[in-house]
Amino acid sequence: MPQQGTSAEFFKSRIRNVPDFPKPGILFYDITTLLRDPEGFKAAIDSLAAPFAGAGIEVVVGIESRGFILGGPVADRLGAGFCPIRKPGKLPAATLRESFSLEYGTDSIEIHTDAIRPGQRVLVVDDVLATGGTAKAAASLVKGLGGTLHGLAFLIELDFLSGREKLTGEQVTSVLHY
Ligand code: AMP
């Protein structure tokens, strides 16, 4: 549920729905129209961070690339550091890689091996939880480095894709549901 009195309608009225992007049959939730609105951007960060206030989060991990836009301010709000998870070949130092299945084929994401110290409390942030493949891979990377995964926070969850089922046992929060 939206935090701090911000209604789902407030967010949904600021998110642009783009049919058939990036391919036919996909309804793309474009958050750029929310982010460009000062009240919308602030409310999004407030709502993502609020469930984790006082939880002792030490590192916020953002998933490329909209997870960077949201994860950075959430980290600042929680008094945590920020670390990026990126597509292969983008991070300059030693990395840990995790692959996951897509509808057709596979994809991979990477994290710097020194991004999280063993035992640090970590929150993963991304814009959309769809099938959950990306988030599950991110969770594996955090745990692979010895991090304590406190939770995963999304702005939007697509309930009909059941991504949450791939994250059984984790604390998953979503500001909005479609
Ligand atoms: P998934 O691994 O299927 O959960 O996909 C998650 C990633 O794909 C997120 O990083 C989203 O940015 C992006 N994504 C998937 N579906 C949508 C959608 N309908 N609208 C916007 N972004 C999406």
Image (cartoon, rainbow, N blue to C red):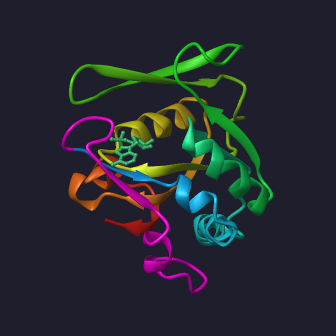
Residue 44 falls within the magenta-colored stretch: no
Nearer to me, 44 or 16: 16
Q: Is residue 134 left or right of residue 145?
A: left
- Quarter holding the N terminus? bottom left
* Residue 176 sits above or below residue 6 on the image: above
**The one of 30 and 60 positioned closer to us in this rendering:** 30
Q: Quadrant of residue 35?
A: bottom right
Q: Measuring 72% from the left and 55% from the top, which residue is drawn there?
A: 73
Q: Camera-side residue: 132 or 59?
A: 132
Q: Is residue 175 left or right of residue 148?
A: left
State whether residue 121 appears in this view.
no
Q: Which residues are magenta?
A: 1-25
Which residue is at a point 59% across and 66% down the rendered structure image?
Answer: 44
Residue 21 position in % (x across, y down): 32, 41
Q: Is residue 160 visible?
A: yes
Position of residue 40 measured from the top left corner of the image (x, y, whole percent): 61, 69
Q: Is residue 143 above or below residue 100?
A: below
The verdict on residue 10 being magenta is yes
Q: Is residue 72 above or below residue 84?
A: below
Q: Residue at x 58, y 64 (%)?
A: 48
